[in-house]
Amino acid sequence: MIPHWKSTWVEVPVTVQVAGAYEANDVVGGTLSCDAHNVKGGGYIHAVRLVDDATQAAAVKLWVFDAAPSTIADAAPHAPTEADHLKCIGIIPIAAADYNTDGTEADCARVKGFDAASEDYVVFDNLPNGKLYFRLVCDATPTYADANDLTLHVCLMLM
């Protein structure tokens, strides 16, 4: 039987530092998570939308985990542990060229939920606690003016 997929957009809260620029390989906002109404039964990430109110259009990688990774602070260098690698189910790149920079108020990147290595959707099984975890890792050196300059949404396709 072919599964019936239901799409659900969830917001992943991000609070950025405003004290200075991030460095390449810094984590933006620490470890992030979304509670998609207790995701059960598995699915995949169909798309990612990152709205940048500071118009930085900075390249980042979105690391996706199926269980809570190790604790990391905002603006700390990303140094995944062995356990983090075992929990990582995909890395979704968001390039500077992915942003729509037509407006003057904000930039918006919309990308498919493709893992950088497999070039296929990031798939997850039944999640132990109904949550996905994320890390935004800088490829550039953005500077944000407000703690709420980034808004991250993930479109989940659920069974």
Image (cartoon, rainbow, N blue to C red):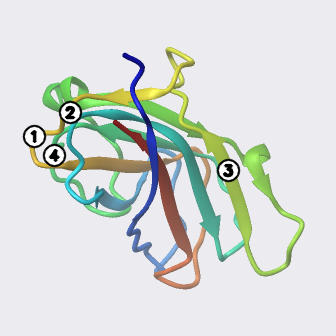
Badge 2 marks a residue whose secondary structure is: helix
Dot 4 lies on which element?
A: loop
The 10 Å Cα crowd at callout 2, few under 14, some 14 to 19, many 20 or more, is some
Residue identifier under label 2: 84
Whether residues under marks 4 and 2 lie with C-beta atoms below 8 angstroms apart, the answer is no
- Place residue 80 in its image quadrant: top left
Q: Are marks 3 and 2 in contact (CB under 8 Å)?
A: no
Between 158 and 51, the residue placed more toward the observer is 158
Asked whether 54 or 123 is in front, the reply is: 123
User: Image height check: is 106 above or below 38?
Assistant: below
Indicate the amino acid at tag 2.
Asp
Q: Amino acid at mark 4?
A: Ala
Q: Which numbered disc, 1 or 3, marks the residue that appears first in the sequence?
A: 3
Residue sitting at x 74%, y 46%: 98
SS of the residue under disc 1: loop
Earlier along the polypeptide chain: callout 4 or callout 1? 4
For marks 4 and 2, give the CA distance: 8 Å
Work out how far the residue at label 4 is from the one at label 1, CA to CA, in angstroms: 10 Å
Pointer 1 residue: 128
Q: Residue at coordinates 53% horizontally, 20% vertically from top-left?
A: 120
Residue topped by disc 4: 68
The image shows residue 105 at horizontal and vertical percentages of: 77, 81
Q: Which residue is mark 3?
A: 110
Residue 142 in picture, x, y percent from top left: 61, 63
